[in-house]
Image (cartoon, helix red, strand yellow):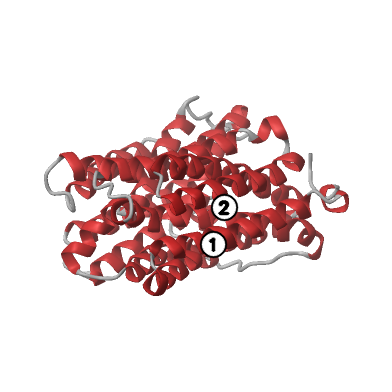
Amino acid sequence: MTTAPAAQPPPRAYLVVAGVFAVGMAGTTLPTPLYGLYRAEIGFSQLLVTVVFAVYALGVIAVLLLAGNYSDLAGRRATVRWGLVLSVASALCFVFEAGLPALFAGRLLSGFAAGLFSGAATAYVLDLAPPHKTRAGLAATAANMGGLGCGPLLAGLLAQYAPWPLRLPYLVHLGLLLLAGLAVQLLPEPLPGANPRSAPHPEGMAVPPEVRTVFVPAACAAFAGFSLMGLFTAVSPSFLTETLGQRNLAVVGLVVFLVFLGSIAGQSALGRLGVRRALPAGCFLLVAGLLMVAAGLAFELLPLLVVGGVIGGVGQGLSFRAGTTAIGAKAPEEHRGATLSAYFVVAYVGISVPVVAVGALAQAVGLKDAGLLFSACVLVLAAVVGGYVLRPRVGATLPR
């Protein structure tokens, strides 16, 4: 008795998943231009702003460590559905927010959702588009970073030009999540043996010896790049309003959006450069961007800050995707998931710990000087990594 071949998914189904992915990730950055309003309403310091932001990264890291392989067991569709449920719970925390505990809960739930989306939705996009692997990979990248960038833009526009600035962005997002949930119900499950009732089995992290020569520089570059993204999503709104006097929340959201747009451009350029050139090139673009960010901070020039952020975003996207590709190609198949989980954990430590340090330092020396010191430290790290990867012995270990 022969089994019927698996039905082919609709040719554009992967784009639907990419749209769902973008909607889910947008919720994780919705609060970015609103932190100033929360500070005025609740009354807390810049340090607490960065701590509230960093709680999100803790949620992502926890899911990567404890449920990184959940979609392989329960299926892509079930995992994405759970991500949407957590996103709804996060949005409701903000809609009914009545103080810091709700903000912390909303950010933590948002991190849990992002942790599920980052692996499951990326795999879902690739699974539903087997003839278009390259195009699907770019769709997943654009959905991830594009969603992260659209969150601040949407919240900034609504908070600036519509009523209920601390409620309406999340109500709109709830509506988008509802549409995303309906779309997921119509999509096929690509894993025939998936069991939605499965429980996650933590794989932990592992970096096999044969991967370490690639892993160390790639992870350091990811740490530096994600630190820049953390600076723009957690700290730059306060700098724009307090130092540059930019009170228009739509402009604040647009600035953050442009940085993430730069990341998409950088990731899409990998195919033309190849990993061996892209990793050091991304690091040096990150250095150039940070120099301009530092100059924008020092001279209080918004255009310089924005251009530096976009160039740094291109460098972040280029180096991050190159590092992901290099580690994925080098790691043994039986340890690939755990090795990539370790890589993502380093990246999310980069988006959280340094910005908390900036918030703490700002209490003592002011936001501008804290930002300058931060830029200098990350710049040195990116320059050292770029120079290290250019060494012939190291470059030879990277795939072309």
Location of the N terminus by quadrant is top right
- Where residue 36 sits, quadrant-wise, is bottom left
Q: Estimate the x, y position of residue 9 in percent, counting from the top left.
A: 50, 30
Task: Residue type at mark 1: give it.
Answer: Gly
| Quadrant holding the C terminus | top right
- Residue drawn 24% across the image and 43% down it: 248
- What is the x, y in percent for residue 27? 33, 50
Q: Which residue is mark 1?
A: 350
Residue 39 lies, in percent from the top left, at 23, 64
Residue 225's disc number = 2
Q: Is residue 22 left or right of residue 191?
A: left
Instruction: Note whether 329 is above or below 380 in the view shown.
Output: above
Q: Is residue 217 left or right of residue 135?
A: right
Q: Is residue 54 above or below residue 157?
A: below
Q: Residue furthest front?
A: 299
Q: Residue furthest right?
A: 393
Q: Residue at point 62% right, 49% down? A: 287
Asked whether disc 2 touches disc 1, contact meaning CB atoms under 8 Å apart, the reply is yes
At 72% from the left and 48% from the top, the residue drawn is 326
Distance between the alpha carbons at the discs numbered 2 and 1: 8 Å
